[in-house]
Amino acid sequence: MVTIDHDAVLRARVLLLGSGQPSRAELVGAYRVLAEVSPQAYMPKLVDALLALRHESRDPKVDLALAAEASRAARRIEAGAPNRAERLHRALDAHQASLFVLGHRAEGRAICEELAESGRSEPLASVLAEEGYFREAAELDEEAARIGIQEHSFWNMVRWAANLEGAGLHDAASAVFSELLEKTRRKAAEQRTALAILTWELVHFSRMRENVGDEASAAAARREALSVLEELATTGEPKDWSCILAWWRTLFVLSGRAAEPAASPESPMPPFGTELRWSRNVRDGFLGMLPGLEAEAAKLREADRLPELVDIQRRIGIRAAVREGDHPYLFEDRFTPYFDEGVTLARRLPDNHARLARALTDRSMFLVAARSFQPAHADFAEAVALLHDR
C-alpha cells in the first residue's frame, strides 16, 4: 500500500498552477508525486518530463537513470490510454540507447526485445546484426514488412537486403534490393526522387551481383547506371533536392563490410546498411580503429605494398564517411583527397583492373554526391570499360 504525502501533493499542485515556469527537474518532481495519486492523468506527463530532462543531461549515468524511470512509468500507463504505445516506444528506445552507451549490451538487448514485442523491431534487428546474427535480423525485417509495420522505404529495404546478404542469402538479398530499385526507377521517372539516388542504388546492385559471380546482371546494372550518369552530366538533376548525402554514405559504408572483421557477440561490428541505428559503443569502436589503420597504411606505403595499401586506404575513407559523410559544408573539399589518393594508388598497380575500377567507381559515386556530374561520368565510364575488358 502506497502512503500518500498530502503535503507533497499540495506543493506539486501549487507548483503546476503557479504563474512561474517550472524547470524540467521541478516538473519531474511534481509529476512523480502526482502520478502516485492520479496515475491516469499524470503518468504520461511523467514519462514526457523524464525524457525531456534526459535531453538536458550530459552525464551517461544520469541519462540511464532517467530513461529507466521513464520506461517503468510508461509500462504503468493503463492499456488503451491515448499514445501509450508511442510513449512506451520512446521510453524504451531511450533506455536501450543509454544502456549501450555504457556498454551494457545484455541489458540493452533485453530492452530491444521488449521493444520488438511491443511492435518495434528495428532496434533489435540492429543489435542482432551488430553481433553477426544476420539471419535472425533479416527475419525481423521480413516480419515487419509482411505485417505492414515498416514502409518499403530506402532505409528499411537496404537494411533488410544487407542482413540477408550478411546471412549468405544472396539471391533473397538481391530480390529485396531489386524491389527497392524498381520503386526508385518509377519515382525517378516521375521526378519524385533524385537521379543520384537511382545511380547509387544501381551501382550497389551491380556490386551485389558481382560478389556472387553474376557478371551479366552486374554489367547490366552498370550500363544502366552509366546511362543515368550521362543524363546527369548532360542536363543535371531535373529538380533541386535537399541534402541526400545520407543515401550515398549508407551504401558506400555498406560496400566495405566484407573487408572488416566478422561481427560476433564478443566483438560486435556496426550494423552495415543502416544509417542511424548504430550502438554508441560499437560506433566508437569502429572509428577507434582509425589510428591502427593509419599506422598500418604508413608501413605499407614505406614498403611499397600497393595492393594492401589501396585496401587499407579504402577502409580509412569509409570511416571518414561514417564520421562526417552527411555534413554538406565543404563536403567536396574534405573528401576529395581520400578518393583521389585511392585512384592514384590503384593506377600504379600493373594490370589490377578490379582495384582500379573499384577506386574509380568510389570516386564517381562521391562526385555524384558532390554534384560534380561530368567528372563522375568520366570516372564511371572508365571503370565500366575496365570491367568489361577483363
Image (cartoon, helix red, strand yellow):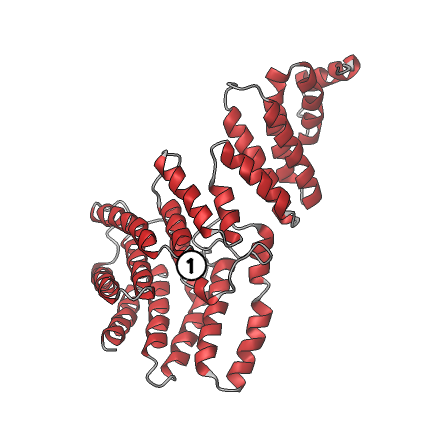
385 lies above or below 235: below
Amino acid at the residue labelled 1? Leu
Quadrant location of the C terminus? bottom left
Measuring 40% from the left and 55% from the top, which residue is drawn there?
245
Q: Quadrant of residue 310?
A: bottom left
349 lies above or below 200: below
Across and down, in percent, residue 169 comes to 36, 54
Measuring 37% from the left and 61% from the top, which residue is drawn there?
370
Measuring 38% from the left and 79% from the top, which residue is drawn there?
346
State the residue position of label 1: 254
Counting other residues with Cα less than 10 Å from the Cα at mark 1, is it few (<14), some (14-19), or many (20 or more)? many
Q: Nearer the viewer, residue 49 or 177?
A: 177
Across and down, in percent, residue 37 comes to 69, 14
Regarding residue 277, the answer to whether it shows in the image is no
Quadrant location of the N terminus? top right
Measuring 58% from the left and 33% from the top, which residue is drawn there?
91
Left or right, 363 with respect to 126, comes to left
Across and down, in percent, residue 374 comes to 27, 67
